[in-house]
Image (cartoon, grey):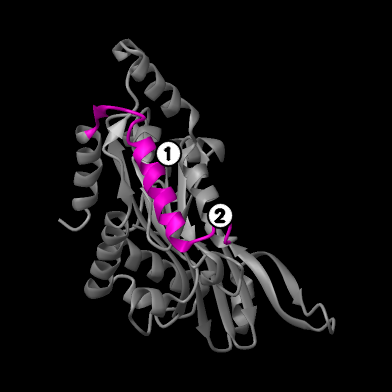
């Protein structure tokens, strides 16, 4: 379930360079001084400084050449051991600063149908970048010092993502509808996860692994979901039906919610209560965009999420 990580092992490790490929100096732009060196270990980016070693990249790709297969507790421990053995340093106590945790789900229908169900999440803004990709990301000041959003919930078609980067799709996932759901923590891990001393060896500890699964589930459960999908054209019988169908096919709901947030941020309306009224009116309209219950689709997705902690 783990994928990309960023961690730092403190200490002096001058012999790491011999285990890396494509090494080059890291130069201080202001002084021109060489302050370390950078190289590759398979897919991982390794930087070595006088203070220690920085490791960034996908542990899943490091183990399996691709991240279609996620790491569980056992394989995470194997990945950490493999990394330690290859670099000839003990990284058990390496401090984590970024972390991705998620799961792949085999679904019955095209992935975009499930993304259409997911509307908004507390303190996060929705961003639908493609038909098959949806992000819920931190707003404004909740970004980390690197400029990244501290937390991002990601839902996307995993097979299309792999195909786009010309990766390898395992036979079990070939020609399937594979939904990837992951949470990306891009800083302030201790604050976000409400725990201290997040080191490499904690990734496969029972308590921490359960914490990550609980957080993955809780973040999903916080999302406001729709119980409706667009009706089929054959179901249109009246002018009212036709109008609802037209609205359903015309409104980009995530973009509209982003516009509403922009109006609120810019203090466009006269009274604070106006934004509540606007949101209520918008929800009233979008609830009319379809009248076919989508309980089966929502239940399928809910059940997959529940199985994470089963």
Residue picked out by circle 1: 157
Residues 113 and 51: in front is 113
- Closer to the N terminus: mark 1 or mark 2? 1
Q: How many marks?
A: 2
Q: Which residue appears at 64% of the width and 82% of the height?
A: 49
Q: Residue furthest front?
A: 270
The C terminus lies in which quarter of the figure? bottom left
Query: Residue visible at 43% across and 36% down?
Result: 159
Taking the magenta stretch, the answer to whether it contains residue 281 is yes
Q: Is residue 82 above or below residue 278?
A: below
List x then y, in percent, for residue 129.
54, 42
Q: Residues within 10 Å of mark 2 (few under 14, many from 20)?
A: few
Q: Which residue matches tag 2?
A: 263
Task: Identify the secondary structure beneath mark 1.
Answer: strand
* Residue 249 visible in the snapshot: yes
- What is the quadrant of residue 262 in the picture? bottom right
Which residues are drawn in magenta? 267-294
Q: Are marks 1 and 2 in contact (CB under 8 Å)?
A: no
In the displayed structure image, the side of residue 265 where residue 305 appears, left or right: left
Residue at point 67% right, 70% down? 38
As drawn, 6 above or below 239: below
Which residue does the image show at 54% across and 71% down from the upper left? 55
Q: Nearer the viewer, mark 1 or mark 2?
A: 2
Q: Position of residue 112 (x, y in %)?
A: 40, 34
Q: Quadrant of residue 234?
A: top left
Question: For mark 1, does the 10 Å Cα neighbourhood hold few (<14), some (14 to 19), or many (20 or more) residues?
Answer: many
Callout 2 secondary element: helix
């Amino acid at each position: 379930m783990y994928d990309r990580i960023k961690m730092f092992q403190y200490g002096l490790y001058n012999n790491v360079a011999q285990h890396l490929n494509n090494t080059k100096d890291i130069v201080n732009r202001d002084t021109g001084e060489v302050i370390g060196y950078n190289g590759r270990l398979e897919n991982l980016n390794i930087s070595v400084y006088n203070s220690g070693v920085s490791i960034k990249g996908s542990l899943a790709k490091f183990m399996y050449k691709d991240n279609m297969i996620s790491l569980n507790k056992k394989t995470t421990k194997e990945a950490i051991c493999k990394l330690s053995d290859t670099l000839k340093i003990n990284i058990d106590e390496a401090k984590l600063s970024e972390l991705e945790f998620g799961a792949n789900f085999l679904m019955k229908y095209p992935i975009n149908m499930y993304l259409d169900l997911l509307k908004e999440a507390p303190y996060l803004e929705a961003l639908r970048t493609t038909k098959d990709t949806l992000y819920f990301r931190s707003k404004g000041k909740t970004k980390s010092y690197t400029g990244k959003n501290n937390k991002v919930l990601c839902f996307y078609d995993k097979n299309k993502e792999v195909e786009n980067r010309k990766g390898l799709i395992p036979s079990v996932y070939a020609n399937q509808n594979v939904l990837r759901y992951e949470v990306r923590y891009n800083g302030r891990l201790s604050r976000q996860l409400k725990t201290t001393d997040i080191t490499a060896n904690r990734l496969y500890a029972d308590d921490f692994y359960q914490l990550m699964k609980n957080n993955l589930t809780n973040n999903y459960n916080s999302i406001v979901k729709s119980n409706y999908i667009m009706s089929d054209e054959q179901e249109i019988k009246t002018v009212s039906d036709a109008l609802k169908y037209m609205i359903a096919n015309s409104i980009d709901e995530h973009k509209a919610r982003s516009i509403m947030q922009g109006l609120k941020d810019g203090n466009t309306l006269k009274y604070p209560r106006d934004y509540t009224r606007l949101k209520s009116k918008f929800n009233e309209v979008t609830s009319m965009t379809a009248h076919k219950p989508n309980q089966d689709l929502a239940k399928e997705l809910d059940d997959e999420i529940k199985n994470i902690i089963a």
